[in-house]
Amino acid sequence: MNGSAAHRVVVVGGGFAGVQAVRGLADAPAEVTLVDRQNYTLFQPLVYQVATGALSPAEIAVPLRRIFRRQRNARVVLAEVKGFDLDAREVVLDDLPNGAGQMRLGYDTRLRFDGRDQVTLLQGSLYVDSGGLGIGPPLTIHTPAGEVRHIGTQFQIRVSGNATDIRVREGRVALQRGGVVARTIAAGDALEVRGSEERWQHGLPSFGAEWEWSASLAPPLAIEDRPLAEFLAWMAREHGWQLHFDDEALQRQAQGIHLHGSLEGLDADAMLERVALVTGVPLDLDEGVLWVGKR
């Protein structure tokens, strides 16, 4: 580590160990992010005294942000860690405060939650999947280029210094400056903003290397007793593929075929190969289209 760089540390869980770990890094040359599903730490040995009325709940539950309010190198993120990739140095967060779906970020990412639906991306890569139209209130992401607001979409943002790159897979996002919409980025578009300079790209595919970093962080899908059709729809959404059934009869059949076992630890190609083998339904991926049945 050079003299100007700081380690970035993610601590999962705000229990006794998590709180002490963050406190222990107070004087370290590190930026520390604590992630927890709750906004407080609970002193569990005294829960029984709350049940008996000897203590009030406020006496055994302390807000995490209050604990670290004077620790400059610490921030608290209210979310659930669904997985992480040590090789890719990336973390998956789910159950966001605004209910807006799923967020995935790289280990090199620095962000700040400013409110229930407000995030500031200071550095690194961020991927958001809102889950579709009307799922939770829009999330506003503050960047050097302005504020990014989405409408039922999948998109990613990368910030490096004064450069902001926005790429949209589904739906659209609005880039606002001073509360006014300056640019609208639609599916298949990418906008790079560097100071006053802008560079557009259009007609980009919804699949490929630019997106696979986020797909590799997707929490494993529990397939036990799950319909084949649901698994195929999940695969297509995670990877930005189009889903094409050979005919309507096969599409109805896929609803009635239920999967069993686990696909954890397999990459996308291996998943498709195994599912095709056990169900007898041909699956073929070609140029971003997942063909189901004989072509």
Image (cartoon, rainbow, N blue to C red):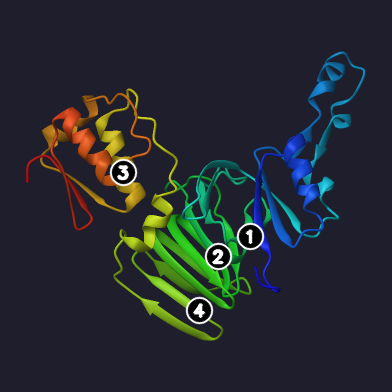
**Residue at the disc numbered 1:** 111
Q: Categorize mark 3 by other alpha carbons within 10 Å: few (<14), some (14-19), many (20+).
A: many
Q: Earlier in the sequence, mark 3 or mark 2?
A: 2
Horizontal side of 231 relative to 86 (left or right) equals left
Q: Is residue 176 above or below residue 199?
A: above
Q: Earlier in the sequence, mark 1 or mark 3?
A: 1
- Report if the CB atoms under discs 3 and 4 are less than 8 Å apart: no
Quadrant in the picture for residue 202: bottom left
Q: Earlier in the sequence, mark 2 or mark 1?
A: 1
Q: Categorize mark 2 by other alpha carbons within 10 Å: few (<14), some (14-19), many (20+).
A: some
The three-letter amino acid code for the residue at tag 1 is Leu
The three-letter amino acid code for the residue at tag 2 is Gly
The secondary structure type at the circle numbered 4 is: strand
Real-space Cα separation, disc 3 to disc 4, in angstroms:
31 Å
Q: Give the mark toward the camera: 2 or 1.
A: 2
Q: Does any portion of residue 277 appear in the rendered image? A: yes
The three-letter amino acid code for the residue at tag 3 is Met
Q: Earlier in the sequence, mark 3 or mark 4?
A: 4
The secondary structure type at the circle numbered 3 is: helix
- Report if the CB atoms under discs 1 and 3 are less than 8 Å apart: no
- Report if the CB atoms under discs 1 and 4 are less than 8 Å apart: no
x, y percentage for residue 165? 48, 71
**Residue at the disc numbered 2:** 124
- Specify the label residue 193 is tagged with: 4
The three-letter amino acid code for the residue at tag 4 is Val
Real-space Cα separation, disc 2 to disc 1, in angstroms:
8 Å
Name, please, the residue furthest toward the top: 52
